[in-house]
């Protein structure tokens, strides 16, 4: 069993998200795929603000920068999804928040995923 994986390998995995997920959507439920984003998405924005860095515990992590998302449909959001036209790359939970059409959702930067070093 491996005891070491170079940061370049972990960055390559995380770079699939940062290089491919070009949209962020706030959703009223957890989507399972891009069609689910269409069903549950209440607002979408083009998104490219990604940072790869050392993990909080070990390994490497990917962080989504803050975003301002214009709401298209009123409802309650509790997830944020990152995707492109064909693939859903990551979904995270956010605090349930009631939103109104034409309003905005402002998200702070947050860690999307961390790949820990092998111990």
Image: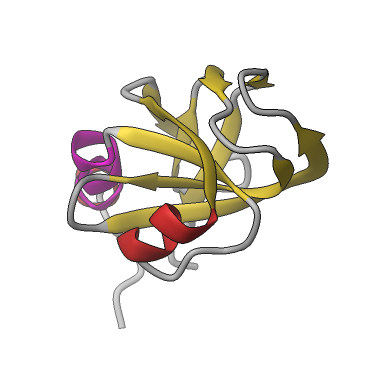
Q: Residue at x 58, y 63 (%)?
A: 30
In the figure, residue 70 lies in which quadrant? top right
Query: Residue 47 vs residue 40: left or right?
Result: left
Picture quarter with the N terminus:
bottom left
Residue 117 visible to an observer of this rendering: no
Residue 77: x and y in percent read 70, 45
Residue 42: x and y in percent read 56, 41
In the figure, residue 53 lies in which quadrant? top left
- Protein image colouring: secondary structure
The overriding secondary structure of the stretch rendered in magenta is helix
In front of the other: 58 or 102: 102
Query: Residue 16 vs residue 47: left or right?
Result: left
In front of the other: 114 or 82: 82
The part of the chain drawn in magenta is 12-21
Q: Residue at x 34, y 35 (%)?
A: 23
In front of the other: 91 or 112: 91
Query: Residue 111 vs residue 77: left or right?
Result: left
Q: Residue at x 43, y 36 (%)?
A: 24
Residue 78: x and y in percent read 71, 50
In the figure, residue 72 lies in which quadrant? top right
Residue 38: x and y in percent read 40, 54
In front of the other: 61 or 5: 61
Query: Residue 66 vs residue 15: left or right?
Result: right
Q: Residue at x 80, y 43 (%)?
A: 95
Image mark count: 0
Residue 83 visible to an observer of this rendering: yes
Q: Is residue 89 above or below residue 1?
A: above
């Amino acid at each position: 069993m491996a005891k070491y994986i170079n940061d370049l390998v972990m960055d390559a995995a995380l770079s699939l998200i940062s290089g491919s997920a070009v949209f962020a959507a706030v959703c009223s439920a957890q989507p399972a795929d891009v069609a689910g984003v269409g069903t549950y998405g209440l607002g979408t924005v083009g998104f490219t603000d990604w940072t790869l860095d050392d993990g909080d515990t070990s390994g490497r992590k990917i962080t989504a920068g803050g975003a301002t998302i214009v709401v298209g449909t009123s409802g309650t959001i509790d997830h944020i999804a990152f995707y492109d036209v064909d693939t859903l790359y990551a979904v995270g939970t956010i605090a349930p928040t009631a939103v109104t059409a034409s309003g905005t959702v402002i998200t702070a930067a947050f860690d999307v995923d961390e790949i820990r070093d092998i111990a």
